[in-house]
Image (spheres, rainbow, N blue to C red):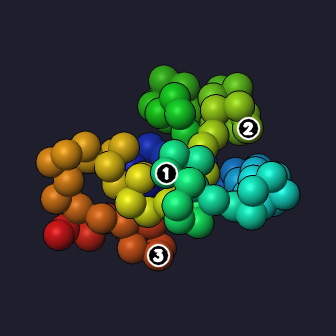
Amino acid sequence: MAKEYARRFYNSKAWKQCRSSFISYRISIDGGMCQQCKDELGFIVDHKEEITPGNINNPDITLNHNNFRYLCLSCHTQKTFGNDARYVFNSKGEVIPI
């Protein structure tokens, strides 16, 4: 689930259009495979440089395809929680305890 300060951004038309165009781009390249493991289909458009309260209004961070990766659920969970993953993301992007 998005952090409170980012909810408005993730519900914005700009993000939804940008996210959709990035997914279409990735599908045109390799069918939409995870950019990290390349074994699973991508599922989450991940920001390489994380969104923070200090940069959330910077479109070079939030809406820039060069700052995105298309990751499967497993790789995104590993990136977010590391080896101590005690959570996973469901199909709605909500955090679920393992």
Residue at (64, 32) in percent of width and height: 67
Which residue is drawn at the image coordinates 36% and 43% (left, top)? Answer: 79
Locate residue 37, reporting x and y percent: 49, 51
Percent from the top left, x then y, of residue 70?
Answer: 60, 51
- The circle drawn on residue 91 is 3
Describe residue 60's horizontal placement relative to residue 39 as left or right: right
Mark 2 or mark 3: whose residue is earlier in sequence: 2
Q: Three-letter amino acid code at disc 3?
A: Ser
Estimate the spatial distance between the alpha carbons at disc 2 and disc 3, rounded to whole Å. Answer: 22 Å
The residue identified by callout 2 is 65
Q: Residue 49 placed where, x, y %? A: 52, 29
Q: Quadrant of the N terminus?
A: bottom left
Left or right of 73? Residue 66 is right
Foreground residue among 13 and 47: 47
| 37 on left or right of 86 | right
Residue 65 vs 37, above or below: the answer is above
Query: Which mark is nearer the camera, 2 or 1?
Result: 1
Q: In this rendering, is residue 92 above or below 19?
A: below
Closer to us: 92 or 42: 42
- Compute the Cα span from label 2 to label 1: 19 Å
Q: Is residue 80 left or right of residue 9?
A: left
Q: Amino acid at mark 1?
A: Cys
